[in-house]
Image (cartoon, helix red, strand yellow):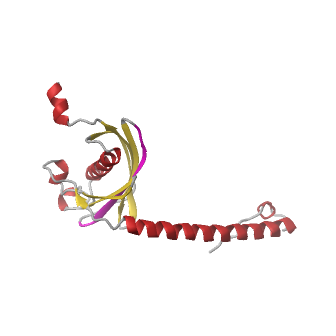
Amino acid sequence: WIERLATDQEVLGSTPSRRTNKGKYENIFRKICYIFLHNSFCNISINDNINLMSKKFIQISTKPGFMKFNGGILLRKISKNEYEFKVKVKKNHLNQAGITHGGYLASVIDSGSGTAARLAGKVAPCVTISLDIKFIGASTLGDELIGNTKIQKITNTMVFLICTLRCKGKIIASASGIWKKIGKSFKNLKNKT
């Protein structure tokens, strides 16, 4: 499965030269080094992730509200800057075409990523400032959706992150967003106005 890259002479239609053969051997050596180093790195990463991902999911939709009404959402911490969440698609989550409604997918991404932003930012609560979602695929009744959120940067007042939502191992939505750390409860803010 190692591909041979075309050289300048082959692309231009001339006959191969010694430079071509030398380049071929350099490419093979480079690919063998890449395969060795890449596989070693992947084995280390996979083993590390297995240990980190052994934690169980916890239900984060314990209080009455929008997400609890829609079936709740489960979350777990993978590493310092990575979180995973999951939901199961129910009949009330489907649109007229029989696939999961985009608004529900957006809500799941917002809730899962927002909770990750809050936990990573070590402040409660956080509010969504910006959420850009690309819908790539579809899911349907009974499917389990698994979201993966990676925190990109945390400042004094903001949390920047990216998220992918998968169904059956395939990405069905990707997102990037910014959350603002407000550091006070909404009840305190409401009483001041």
Q: Give the range drawn in magenta.
A: 142-155
Asked whether residue 144 is drawn in magenta, I would say yes
Q: Residue furthest bottom?
A: 1
> 119 or 177: which is nearer to us?
119
Determine whether, in the image, residue 91 is placed left or right of residue 16. Answer: left
> 61 or 167: which is nearer to us?
61
Q: Which residue is drawn at 25% across and 41% down?
A: 125
x and y percentages locating residue 114 in the rendered image: 30, 46
Determine whether, in the image, residue 77 is placed left or right of residue 10. Answer: left
Asked whether residue 159 is drawn in magenta, I would say no
x and y percentages locating residue 78 in the rendered image: 37, 59
> 22 or 55: which is nearer to us?
55
Q: Which quadrant does the C terminus fall into?
A: top left
- Residue 139 visible in the snapshot: no
- Residue 5 visible in the snapshot: yes
Determine whether, in the image, residue 3 is placed left or right of residue 83. Answer: right
Most prominent secondary structure in the magenta stretch?
A: strand
Q: Place residue 38 in its image quadrant.
A: bottom right
Tally of marks: 0
Q: Residue at x 37, y 38 (%)?
A: 158
Q: Which quadrant does the N terminus fall into?
A: bottom right
Q: Residue at x 39, y 54 (%)?
A: 80
x and y percentages locating residue 15 in the rendered image: 85, 67
x and y percentages locating residue 89 in the rendered image: 24, 61
> 134 or 34: which is nearer to us?
34
Q: Residue furthest top?
A: 193
